Image: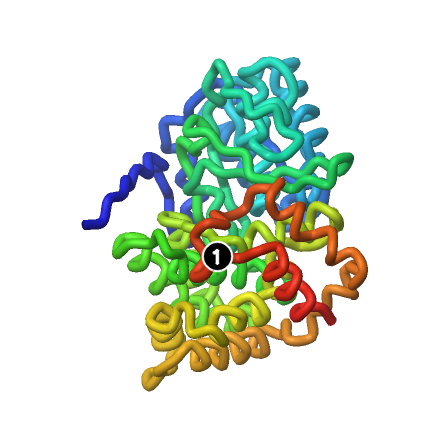
Amino acid sequence: MYNFIFDNPVRVLFGPGQLKNLHKEALPGKKALIATSNGSSTKKYGYLAAVEKELDLAGVAHVLFDEVRPNPTDKNVMDGAKKMKEEGCDFIVALGGGSVMDCSKCIALMAANDGDIWDYSLSGAGGKKTPKSDALPIVCITTSAGTASEVDMASVISKDESHEKTGIFFASMMPTLSVVDSDLMMSVPPKFTAYQGMDAFFHASETVVNTKHHPMAEMFALKTIELVAEYLPRCVKDGSDREAREMMAYANTFAGYYMMCTSAHTMEHTMGSFHENLVHGAGLIMIAEAYYGFFADKKAAEENMVKMARAMGAENAKSGQDFMAALKKLIRDVGCADLRMSDAGITKEELRLYPAKVHEVLGGDITADPLPLSDEDYLEIFERAYK
């Protein structure tokens, strides 16, 4: 008997052009902090102006916080929470990709609670406290197809001083309302389209090989894998392919509805905790062949890997090696076969520091891998992945 809870209270406006309907929704407050990245894309492509217009039409006041960096930090969170309090904002609008949405969830939490965000982290150096108050309401408007942060309560935040990149999540950090409008994803460059899309793929593939997965999770995950395999290469080749962008938006959200990550995500968080500029999806790609190959070589997830291979179009798949062939082809097809850990500044010598850090950061369930991994196994996978 499978036991699970499916509780996703997020109201989602899904589809091209849905941002224009935001003002018709019952927004959860009277004054919003609009959180965006410290880059220029939301302004350059008119997304910020479009959101401001929607809030104006809804009669909602707003102020801008445009300081969220890629791999957002505890400082980003606390700076945003300070501004939210000072400006009297009663909800937050996250406009951006996973980094912005993750940071916004934590800003909303800290705008309602005392102390520092790391007081509530479950990481090695975290305070492991339970917040006294719920997060303020959160509205997410995603501009990427990868993290699915718009439909879950999780966030990933970095603390540079302690080399920690970890998950922070409480039920009140679930967004109230989210907009998944693929028109906002058309401007993502090919490289980042690939990184983000493969993040969605790995959310799904980790769910399928996860020893604690169940039919509900598998349903969403296998559909995600099918969509990514078919449409991500098209998105990378031609970013103006509207059908492909919309289908990748579906894939992203489907993966988020039941995401059951394994140690692969934790291993990438370890890499990112040492290298703040490492793009999450790129890090996952760097270790993917070594990680899944470790289990395929040991025939540890044969049935589930065959399911994934068939979802990717290998109709006659019979073993985990068929999945490995399909995975390598997909990575080639999205232009990521030449990604190198060394190009991200990772040295082979520092890999020996990583296994211990795996136990200190949060990313996925390290007890749910197809085989239990020892620190020696983690190091072997990192070393096999290194180039």
Q: Going 40% across and 62% down the picture, which residue do you hit?
A: 209
Task: State the image coordinates of residue 77 (x, y, percent, origin top left).
Answer: 65, 29
Q: Quadrant of the C terminus?
A: bottom right
Relative to the observer, which residue lies in front, 304 or 9?
304
Task: State the image coordinates of residue 116 (x, y, percent, origin top left).
Answer: 65, 21
Amino acid type of the residue tagged 1 in the rendering: Pro
Regarding mark 1 in the picture, which secondary structure is present there? loop
Q: In this rendering, does residue 345 appear at all?
A: no
Q: Quadrant of residue 237?
A: bottom right
Relative to the observer, which residue lies in front, 312 or 244?
312
Residue under pointer 1: 372
Q: Quadrant of residue 284?
A: bottom right
Left or right? Give the position of 212 relative to 103. left
Answer above or below: position of 201 versus 260: below
Task: State the image coordinates of residue 288 (x, y, percent, origin top left).
Answer: 57, 66
Q: Going 56% across and 46% down the picture, which residue do you hit?
A: 98
Answer above or below: position of 329 versus 104: below
